[in-house]
């Protein structure tokens, strides 16, 4: 027995698994950086971006995001690559022949998967969002064009029982048209404010309403008040219209939970995207176990063509997994399927595949 009760075989497999994984990730990230630099070099030169910012602000914070994104693919490849080599050299047969069960053989693989899963959880929930803040701000500053919010038919709940409607809003002018505030008590409408135009006054930090009228339904005569202009404070700010879906990547898991509560209250149209992201940050790390199970089950069987066939099967399955993850995620964001089901569906499907492959694997 060795350190922490692990046998030499366990340490050997863990070393091979993690060593192959990190080497593969380092290799692919080098290639990704070369292609990304080739695509953006004109923007960097045109904007006269300092080299220090390109290296330490953009690419230094670029690496964690894309390394984590590609991790399912390279977990598959790592497991299949070195396990297939063990199989082709008859080492797996020797291990099983010496009284080590197939279930026991899986232990160091799952221990490695646990390490990678925990690493992915903290990367996705806390480290990557902080890195993304710098990377995305860099992209907005030097690469992306100015963001313009010109959505129509916007509905928000700004307080319990208080709803806002804006027919159209332009974030560059912080102004909108056909503005309405409705207040309800016990599901009954008690007042309604309607204005032709609304704009944000940065000096008073209030909304300025033009050509408005207010109808009070709580009184018998339903009083009507009208005027040319009125200022009002609302639990609604220009920044609420500047939330971009890309900004989800900048939120830590703690910040994401807070934003979801705020958007739930306001009835934001993009709420589902935030909920999907919250579920994804748990489902994604869990996939390390499923992909490891499939990888080992596939590669412990000798095949004609050797390691190449197993790697080909692994690549095909990993690309299908990533495709499913994207497709079901978009379906969940569009409310076509429940968010929780949409996020976990790829894991459920591949877990069933993994169990089947594990059962038929030669033991």
Image: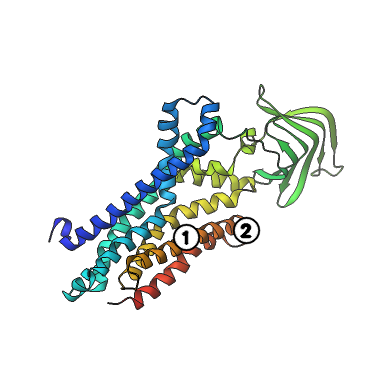
Badge 1 crowding class, 10 Å Cα cut-off, few under 14, some 14 to 19, many 20 or more, is: few
Residue lying at the far left in this picture: please name it. Answer: 1
Instruction: Point out the frontmost of discs 1 and 2.
Output: 1
Label ID, residue 5 = none
Label 1 or label 2, whichever comes before in sequence order: 1
> Which corner quadrant holds the N terminus?
bottom left
Q: CA distance from mark 1 to mark 2?
A: 24 Å
- Which disc, if any, is residue 319? 1
| Quarter location, residue 201 | top right
User: What x and y, as percent, mark residue 320?
Assistant: 49, 63
For the residue pair 209 and 308, the one nearer the viewer reads as 308
Q: What residue is rendered at 27% in x and 52% in y?
A: 19
One can see residue 92 in this view: yes
Front-most of 61 and 286?
61
Q: How is the image coloured?
A: rainbow
Query: Which SS class for mark 2?
Result: loop
Quadrant in the picture for residue 151:
top right
Quarter of the picture containing the C terminus is bottom left
Q: Position of residue 259 (x, y in %)?
A: 54, 43
| Mark 1 residue element | helix
Residue 7 visible? The answer is no
Residue at the (49%, 26%) spot, across then down: 49
User: Which residue has dot 2 on it?
Assistant: 335
Q: Nearer the viewer, residue 286 or 239?
A: 286
* Neighbour tally class for label 2: few under 14, some 14-19, many 20 plus, Cα within 10 Å: few
Lateral position of residue 161 relative to residue 210, left or right: left
In this figure, what is the number of numbered marks? Answer: 2
Q: How far across and down, in percent of the image, does residue 10 sit?
A: 20, 61
Q: Residue at x 35, y 66 (%)?
A: 293
């Amino acid at each position: 027995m060795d350190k922490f009760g692990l046998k030499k075989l366990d340490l050997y497999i863990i070393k091979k698994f993690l060593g192959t994984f990190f080497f593969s990730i380092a290799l692919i990230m080098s290639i990704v950086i070369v292609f990304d630099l080739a695509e953006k070099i004109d923007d960097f030169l045109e904007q006269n971006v300092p080299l220090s910012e390109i290296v330490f602000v953009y690419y230094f914070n670029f690496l964690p995001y894309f390394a984590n994104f590609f991790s399912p693919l390279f977990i598959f490849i790592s497991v299949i690559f070195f396990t297939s080599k063990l199989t082709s050299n008859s080492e797996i047969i020797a291990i099983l022949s010496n009284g080590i069960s197939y279930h026991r053989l899986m232990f160091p693989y799952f221990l490695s998967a646990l390490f990678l899963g925990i690493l992915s959880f903290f990367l996705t929930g806390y480290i990557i969002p902080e890195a993304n803040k710098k990377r995305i701000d860099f992209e907005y500053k030097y690469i992306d064009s100015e963001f313009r919010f010109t959505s129509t038919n916007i509905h928000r709940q700004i307080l319990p029982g208080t709803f806002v409607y804006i027919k159209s809003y332009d974030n560059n002018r912080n102004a909108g048209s056909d503005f309405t505030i409705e207040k309800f008590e016990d599901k009954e409408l008690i007042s309604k404010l309607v204005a032709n135009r609304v704009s944000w006054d940065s000096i008073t930090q209030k909304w300025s309403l033009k050509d408005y009228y207010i109808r009070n339904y709580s009184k018998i005569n339903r009083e009507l008040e009208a005027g040319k202009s009125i200022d009002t404070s609302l639990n609604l700010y220009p920044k609420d219209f500047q939330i971009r879906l890309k900004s989800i990547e900048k939120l830590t898991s703690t910040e994401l939970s807070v934003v979801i509560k705020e958007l739930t209250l306001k009835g934001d149209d993009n709420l589902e995207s935030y909920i999907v992201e919250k579920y994804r940050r748990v489902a994604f790390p869990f996939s390390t176990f499923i992909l490891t199970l499939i990888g080992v089950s596939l590669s412990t069987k000798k095949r004609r063509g050797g390691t190449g066939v197993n790697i080909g099967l692994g690549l095909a399955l990993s690309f299908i997994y990533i495709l499913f993850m994207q497709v079901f995620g978009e379906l969940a964001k569009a409310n076509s399927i429940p968010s929780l089901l949409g996020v976990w569906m790829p894991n459920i499907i591949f877990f069933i595949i993994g169990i089947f492959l594990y059962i038929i694997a030669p033991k």
